[in-house]
Amino acid sequence: MDAEPARVTFGTVLKTGEFRALWLAELLSTLGDQVARVALAVLVFNTTDSAVLTGLTFALTYVPTLLGGIFLAGLGDRFPRREVMVAANVVQAVLVAAMAVPNVPLPVLCLLLAVSVLATGPFNAAQLAILPDLLSGQRYVTAMSLRNVTTYSAQLAGFAGGGLLIAVLNPYLGLAIDALTFVVSALLLWTGLRPRPAVRSEEHAEPTSILHGFTVIWRDPRTRILLGIGALALFYIAPEALGAPYAEQLGMGPTAVGLLMAADPIGAVVGSLLFDRLSEVARLRSVGWLGVAAGAPIAACALYPNLVLSMALFACSGAAATIYTIQAMTTASRLLPNSVRAQGMGFASAVIQSVQGVGALVAGAFAQVFTPAGGMAVVGCVGVVLAAGLALAWRRVANPAQLAVQLTG
């Protein structure tokens, strides 16, 4: 790899052709997925007139990722990672194209959707595992920051643009567009990444039980604590999960719901930009305490802030959570042996995504017992306490200065 420049920027990492192909492929897929989520919501609601079935279909765009991350992440270690990502894209393109056929029965539509999302697990695992092969040192962490900026921006643009597209045209076109993005993504990956052999062969493979990804993470106390920090998302999903009832408590309407739910992703974009401004040592030293900083604004809902202040609090929470999540994931990825990196990171990514669904249920339960503001305050306080414990544990097992040298060396 080339010598690392004095200051690494987004432009610096985008000059690396292989990363640029990976980044463009992910950007296209994310945009297409958000359009497809809007299309599915409209399609299912128009067909069934059922909010419950619409919500279930939306959940199916996330839930199977956990199963893919646990059961299929090891494919990114057993087989060449480029080929795993391309195969996942091709499978998704075919399945989503089948969903775009008019008048597909709802049960079949749900099955196609679930299998398509299942393929996201091995794709994410292989992608996270191959990134350190493309970029090292500060270039790697800057690339992860750029991925977060573009992912959250694409989600916001996809939801907004998807709604307009579906309103003007029809939901089947939205699904067809999503299928096309997977095709283009596969072509970008196939032509933009050079072939690499699998990191593990059949003859020299470690045992790959269902829980092997968990074992890979758990056996090192540093990666174990980093996974715990990442899993704080269980508590910090509350602003998005309770946006509608919280707005109602404030005496506001649907516009306020959208503003409240958008505050966290906007904060995440800001956090991704700030991430690159901090040194590796500073990020490693503060990774746990940023978990505390992410929970404190949510706990402040106990003071019943107005709409503007609530948006500011949620944006601050999203910014802090994004910084600690990027740092936790990049550090864990570099600490894991390359031979098991896909399985370990696939498991970690699946856990962090799935706990958000659990967190939404927990926040809803507390909101039912108290009020939406009270429910958010409770989960925010619990998150702060657990984050403080993880920060102290991290301080015991990791020396930030030494670890920064190890990671960037």
Image (cartoon, grey):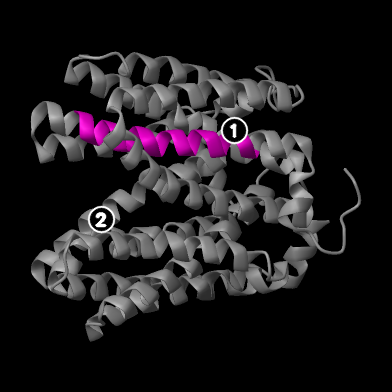
Q: Residue 89: where, in percent of width, then height?
A: 52, 23
Element class at badge 2: helix
Q: Residue 262: where, in percent of width, then height?
A: 36, 60
| Badge number at residue 25 | 1
Q: Which residues lie in the magenta part?
A: 23-43
Taking depth in this image into account, of 45 and 283 the one nearest to the observer is 45
Q: Quadrant of the C terminus?
A: bottom right
User: What amino acid type should be assigned to the residue bearing mark 2?
Assistant: Ala
Taking depth in this image into account, of 338 and 375 the one nearest to the observer is 375
Is residue 225 rendered to the left or right of residue 199? left
User: Local crowd at mark 1 within 10 Å, few (<14), some, or many (≥20)?
Assistant: many
Q: Residue placed at 57% from the left, 27% from the top?
A: 185
Q: Residue placed at 26% from the left, 39% from the top?
A: 59
Q: Residue placed at 65% from the left, 26% from the top?
A: 189
User: Is residue 397 in the magenta section?
Assistant: no
Q: Residue 268: where, in percent of width, then height?
A: 48, 62
Element class at badge 1: helix
Q: Quadrant of residue 188?
A: top right
Is residue 246 rendered to the left or right of residue 83? left
Dominant secondary structure (helix, strand or loop) of the stretch shown in magenta: helix
Residue 369 higher or lower than 67, as above or below: below
Q: Residue placed at 75% from the left, 21% from the top?
A: 195
| Badge number at residue 360 | 2
Taking depth in this image into account, of 301 and 98 the one nearest to the observer is 98
Q: Quadrant of the N terminus?
A: top right
